Amino acid sequence: MRINEIGENRVAYSKADFRILKDKFSQSLVTHNGEPLSCELYGASFSHGALAVETEHGEAHEVHVAEACNIAAVISSIGRILSLPRSDIACEEMSEVLLLRLDVLREYIRSAVETSHEGTYTESNADMTIKRWAGFLKHPSDYVFAHRCLSSPEVTYEPPTIEIDCAFLTTWDKLKRRERDQKKSDLAHRVVSIKLPDIGKVEAFFSSCADHINKLVAANTLQSVAS
């Protein structure tokens, strides 16, 4: 489900957007020494998946923390994605990839928090925005059957174009199954335009991820001190 125009009905972030997001990403999820923020979990004794390695001479090596490495790998991959676009075409191709990868990060962080401290993970509005968009991008036909996925600001459509945006997905999320089926039927064979979440919402997601990780580090460190 894709349209070609980049404008008011935005289907891609611009090169300038990617630069802004990369800066915010680095400020939120990369430490001063260039490491992913999750590496801070190495210093907490009660991090899940911790493994101390000793040599045959009894020398202790740095503790390995599985959840720290898993989250760090996703953070690093997102950093590479944000550095990739060099053209408008590349922006179109990478915008959806970015949102889907952000949802992987959301899920990894949620799993890490719940594994270490069950019942303590609370989804923020920013987390839910990324989750909803990933669900739509992976399974668009679960939301609407579109006759044509093309849109132009210079053309008037009758019936009017359906705009898939944050408000649409938020409303959809609150519908019961029967209501979703009815709405899907009502929207069948309509022209669809897609408006991705603005970069402010993506920046808010970066901050939310950093908040989750920092709280996890603090909780694990506190548990270590208490023991």
Image (tube, helix red, strand yellow):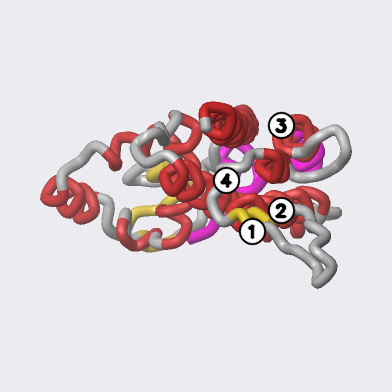
Decide which of tag 3 and tag 2 comes sooner along the chain: 3
Q: Is residue 13 magenta?
A: yes
Local secondary structure at mark 4:
loop
| Residue 120 is one of the magenta-drawn residues | no
Q: Are marks 3 and 2 in contact (CB under 8 Å)?
A: no
Kindly report which numbered mark, 3 or 2, lies closer to the viewer in this rendering: 2
For label 3, the residue is 28
Amino acid at circle 1: Leu
Q: Nearer the viewer, residue 116 or 199?
A: 116
Name the chief secondary structure element in magenta. loop
Query: Decide: marks 2, 1 in contact (CB < 8 A)?
Result: yes
Identify the mark nearer the N-term, 4 or 2: 4
Amino acid type, callout 2: Val
Pointer 4 with pointer 3, Cβ within 8 A: no
At 51% from the left and 56% from the top, the residue drawn is: 150
Residues in magenta, as a range: 1-20
Q: Which residue is mark 4?
A: 47
Question: Residue 166: percent from the left, percent from the top?
Answer: 44, 36
Q: Which residue is mark 2?
A: 63
Amino acid at pointer 4: Ser
